Amino acid sequence: MTEKILPGNLESYWLANNELPLFPKLNENIEVDVLVVGAGLTGITAAYLLSKSGKSVAVIEGSKILHGTTGFTTAKVTTQHGHVYQQLINTFNEEKAKLYYEAQVDALNFVERTVSDLDIKCDFEKVPAYIYADTEDGVDTVTKEMDAYQKLGIGPATLTEQTELPYQVKKALRLDNQGQFHPVKYAKALVDHSVQNGVHFFEETRAKDLLSDNIVKTVDGHKIKAKKILVCSHYPFNDENGLYFTRLEPHRSYVIAAPAEKSSPKGMYINVEQPTRSIRSALGSDGKRYILLGGEGHVTGRQEGDTTAKYETLAAYGREKFNFQWYNYRWSAQDLETLDKVPYIGVMTSDKPDVLVATGYRKWGMTNSVVAAQIMVDNVLGKENRFAEFFAPTRSKMKKEDITKFTKANASVAKEFVKGKTEKVDLQLEDLKVGTGDIVKVEGKKVGAYKDENGKVYLVKPVCTHMGCDVAFNNAESSWDCPCHGSRFNYKGEVLEGPAFEPLKRLN
């Protein structure tokens, strides 16, 4: 029954009915003051800020602008990032936890001010944010987070049992004066202003290598020389001996959207237990309110069973709690989590001071993207930034718990690698159902196969081109996902997300 109420095609609510500008593919070697790699909200915000500096700026995007994580977010512009502040106090100390909070406040204020200054029609509105508990253990988590708020001066905040959700919760922590908006409309306005100020954007231009003398080489072989390089590609295209692929864990999460038949709950909501449920309303282009339900997250490529079930579970939840009978949109996103839950922003490695990176937002990219853009732009312009040291990717002395997590994460990757190389495959090509993909046996060898709705078969070598892990098929999105470091490929083997930049080998 749930299957019938879900839309057949994947489509982000934010990208539907929104025409984005088209930009050319880079077809020559160029030289600029600043090269921005990645045209999501981080790269676009950085380009916008730099466009007023008088420096020459180019932005390259491996696919289309805003078709990465930014176009598939839930777009909460908030300083409430789940129950993170007690964790930050435990991992660092109160002073550094407060720095994280103050950085997010500055980012929220920047978005609100920019919307006003540029008169951006992006449905920006001030709403409260809630974390809430459904269990007694959850109540304890919420209460401890309130204690952290009081220590750090976060507010105005209240503990309450009253929300605008259509069901009762045991306890909620409400934080007032937060924001939400339409991320694509907002980012598009920044792009327009950047172009007017002389910034050059290039689409379908994927970075491949960082050569000496600050030269970035694209997959097509063109070279871009820059004084400063800002790597805003979500997953760094260049590792630069920073071992980022060992320090970032990729997660996928799922979202569905349905029209609110009656009054919609004001505010943004996320529970503290597992499975996580994220809830917010949004104003549609048709003037109606939509409810966005998110959750069902898992480490990329490591989900047992058919990933389509993730959407079905969310749909069932929406039917139970909101009485939704159908859904207009469904989509998913990929996020990266660092060892200590703080993004890596700043100089990528100590020996390359002109190469900066921003990654690891842990699903809270609407404010962290602004934090990142401001830190990187201040670096370019030679300005001090009081948050730079805290977010620096080169921050040293991992705590004992971080080292433990680091070891476990890498052990898990190794396990997935070995598993992929050793597990037996019994499925035959003729057994593959229409519209699905899987690892099958062809002439005694393991082959990645996808059969489209017309019965056409696409065969690939099911080995990630990043570090050789075996990929798994994601039926919900018709993609090949790597369980080791999160690279993703479409059913034809073409790169969707890095760190891989070479496609899977086609076998037919």
Image (cartoon, rainbow, N blue to C red):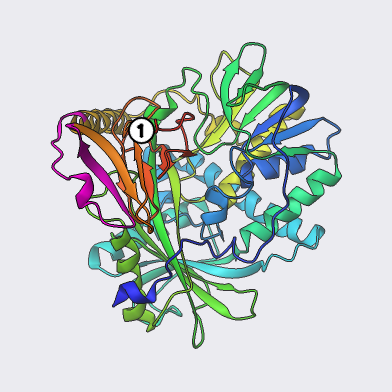
Q: Residues within 10 Å of mark 1 (few under 14, many from 20)?
A: few
Among all residues in the image, which is located at the extreme bottom? 262
Left or right: 425, with 337 as reference point = left
In the image, is residue 424 part of the stretch drawn in magenta? yes
- Residue 382 appearing in the image: no
Q: Quadrant of the N terminus?
A: bottom left
* Residue 43 sits above or below residue 317 on the image: above
Q: Residue at x 77, y 32 (%)?
A: 57
Report x, y in % for residue 92.
42, 37
Report x, y in % for residue 18.
66, 63
Residue 14: image quadrant is bottom right
Can you identify the residue that label 1 sits on? Answer: 507
Q: Residue at x 46, y 21 (%)?
A: 242
The foreground one among 79 and 183 is 183
Q: Residue at x 32, y 31 (%)?
A: 463
Q: Amino acid at mark 1?
A: Leu
Magenta-colored span: 421-444
* Residue 441 sits above or below residue 257 on the image: above
Q: Quadrant of the C terminus?
A: top left
Left or right: 373, with 197 as reference point = left
The foreground one among 416 and 180 is 416
